[in-house]
Amino acid sequence: AQSVTQLDSHVSVSEGTPVLLRCNYSSSYSPSLFWYVQHPNKGLQLLLKYTSAATLVKGINGFEAEFKKSETSFHLTKPSAHMSDAAEYFCVVRTKYNFNKFYFGSGTKLNVKP
Amino acid sequence: DVKVTQSSRYLVKRTGEKVFLECVQDMDHENMFWYRQDPGLGLRLIYFSYDVKMKEKGDIPEGYSVSREKKERFSLILESASTNQTSMYLCASTRVLSEKLFFGSGTQLSVL
């Protein structure tokens, strides 16, 4: 079975400080992992993806995530938050067993304070 | 850019009504999906389609059906709307084996 757990429903940081959004996954098969971002009143957009190449993945807008198989984690980070990063972030898993199913986490809302 | 268009941004319906949500994509994608998004629950897959007239149930198909008569269009049907179907509905599409989902802007459905 596949599942995704986002450990924090809300994260609040000050502008210019680091961002950490946590994600743990459960998968019976080699997973592909993604982070999607949803800005208010906008559609979801792919931020980055891991598909069994390099374990440290770089995405758009300075975000990156590290795949840690031993910890079954795929946490999203950014060294310095910007006001425009305020959005909801979703961790997503898909397995090689069933390419058609993307399993979404419950989401983490990131608030960036000036 | 790929465009996924959902016909309505906001919709208000009454309990028991039949509701159609339409989604059109313009990039010849094989796969199309319907999700519902609820606070604290993330996105949950209702149905997906991998070809014209082909469909597969997702995790929460009860109370919903779908139709895909043309490759570019995927419709979600609520046969008899109920208040617990009040939600944000998101359509997405992707090429087969692709890792990138393209989403529409969503339809906020309220069932009164």
Image (cartoon, rainbow, N blue to C red):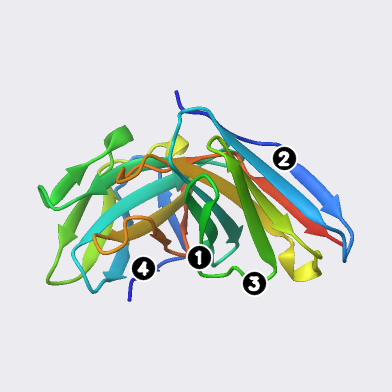
* On-image quarter of the N terminus of chain A: bottom left
The image's mark for residue A4 is: 4
Is circle 2 on the same chain as circle 3? yes
Is circle 1 on the same chain as circle 4? no
The residue that label 1 is drawn on is B58
Q: Residues within 10 Å of mark 4 (few under 14, many from 20)?
A: many
Kind of residue indicated by mark 2 = Arg
Mark nearest the camera among 2 and 1 is 1
Image height check: is A74 above or below A53? below
Is circle 2 on the same chain as circle 4? no
Mark nearest the camera among 1 and 4 is 1
Q: Percent position (x, y) of residue B32?
A: 50, 46
Q: Residue at x 14, y 49 (%)?
A: A56
Q: Quadrant of residue A74?
A: bottom left
For mark 3, name the chain: B
For mark 1, name the chain: B
Kind of residue indicated by mark 1 = Gly
Kind of residue indicated by mark 4 = Val
The image's mark for residue B9 is: 2
3D distance between C-alphas at marks 4 and 3: 22 Å
The image's mark for residue B62 is: 3
Between B43 and A77, the residue placed more toward the observer is B43
| SS class, disc 3 | loop
Mark nearest the camera among 4 and 3 is 3
For mark 4, name the chain: A
